[in-house]
Amino acid sequence: MQYYKEKSQNSIRCVLCKHYCILKEGSNGICGINYNIDGELVNTTYGHPSALNIDPIEKKPLYHFLPASTSLSIGTVGCNFRCPFCQNYSISQTSQVDEGITIMPRRIVEIAQENFTASISYTYNEPTIWYPYAKDIGVLAKEAGLKNIFVSSGYESHEVLQNMTSWVDAANIDLKSFSKQYYKKVLKTDLEGVKESLKEFAKSNIWLEITTLIIPDVNDSQKELQAMAEFISGELGTKIPWHLSAFHPDYKMQSTPATPLTTLIKAKEIAKSHGIEYVYIGNVANDNATYCPKCKEKIVHRDGFSARIVGLKDAKCKKCGYKIAGVWEV
């Protein structure tokens, strides 16, 4: 796909995310890393990762996609959100590219193969804004038999979402709040745009899981949690795993207390009351095993980021035969 459209003789429109920034010659978009250079969109982070690590797939978090496997995780710099709680703010909230580090797409795939990872994850900062680099890696990874994972805040453009279905296998998308005002005033984006993306993901061939960071006095009210649960169950489906993660003070929210376990348990109860079958509590010590929704047999045992399939056969519960949603084999 072409990542921009001509707007006028002196400007182009970036089509990587739903901001659809109009860029005049020499200027960059909200993300800080995509520029109009000589009438073309130039991604300054292409080939210049800021982070490269081997992670357990459970860290993404993905609990129903190749559990117990590892993923080569890669990120760059920049972001199209302005989250005051970002744990990776040192790379997401800067546009300073370290051009001294250059790793081209084929080498990224080779590193994954050398380390026997089952997948490559595009994560740490928002991968939508460096989609040209991610896709070039992903296409080669797919040819090599590797899976591709997108960890995103869900503000992809419709054009990118359509294009992703040709090479992305799984995604974990943040649903950060259910307040239009919070998305607009604090995060500098639009809740409706994220909801649209989630609906597209849910209808696509991309395996989807959702994460919500539960922040005290921000999105932890019963009313807001009910609204999120209703949206997920009613608009996306009850078989999509929902990760409810504990907030810990960071970046611009150092004075906000950590999320109490009681709040997370209540949020899980609300999700379950709406029929969501797979709900997990993250960032705290807790039982995060996967259980059969029908007979409650343990399907996947988890201890921290390690996992072991114990009750699954042919994607079904060994005890009662109930089909467990997910991607369990390469």
Image: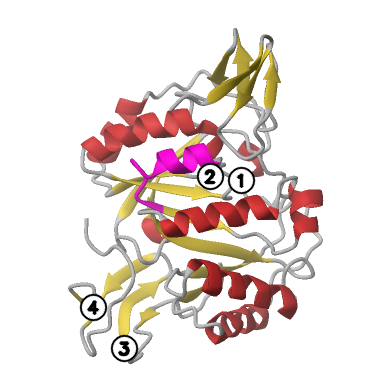
Whether pointer 3 and pointer 1 mark residues with C-beta atoms closer than 8 Å, the reply is no
Give the mark nearest the N terminus, 4 or 3. 3
Whether pointer 2 and pointer 3 mark residues with C-beta atoms closer than 8 Å, the reply is no
Residue placed farthest to the left in the image? Answer: 314
Which one is in front in this view, the residue at disc 1 or the one at disc 4? 4
Above or below — where is 169 with respect to 135? below
Type of amino acid under label 1 = Asn
Q: Which residue is mark 1?
A: 88
Q: Which residue is mark 4?
A: 316
Type of amino acid under label 2 = Tyr
Q: Dot 3, crowdedness within 10 Å: few (<14), some or many (≥20)?
A: some
Question: In the image, is residue 160 part of the stretch drawn in magenta?
Answer: yes
| Residue pictured at 57% horizontal, 22% vertical | 5
Give the mark nearest the N terminus, 2 or 3. 2
| Residue pictured at 66% horizontal, 43% vertical | 89
Image coordinates for residue 241, horizontal then vertical, percent: 45, 69
- The residue range painted magenta reads 158-170
Is 313 left, or right, of 200 in this rendering?
A: left
Give the mark nearest the N terminus, 3 or 1. 1
Q: Quadrant of residue 295?
A: bottom left
Image coordinates for residue 140, horizontal then vertical, percent: 28, 32
Is 102 left, or right, of 137 in this rendering?
A: right
Q: Quadrant of residue 205?
A: bottom left
Type of amino acid under label 4 = Lys
Q: Quadrant of residue 329?
A: bottom left
Whether pointer 1 and pointer 2 mark residues with C-beta atoms closer than 8 Å, the reply is yes
Q: Which residue is mark 2?
A: 124
Real-space Cα separation, disc 3 to disc 1, in angstroms: 37 Å
Task: Judge by depth and name the residue closer to the eye, 5 or 242.
Answer: 5
Whether pointer 2 and pointer 4 mark residues with C-beta atoms closer than 8 Å, the reply is no
Q: Which residue is mark 3?
A: 297
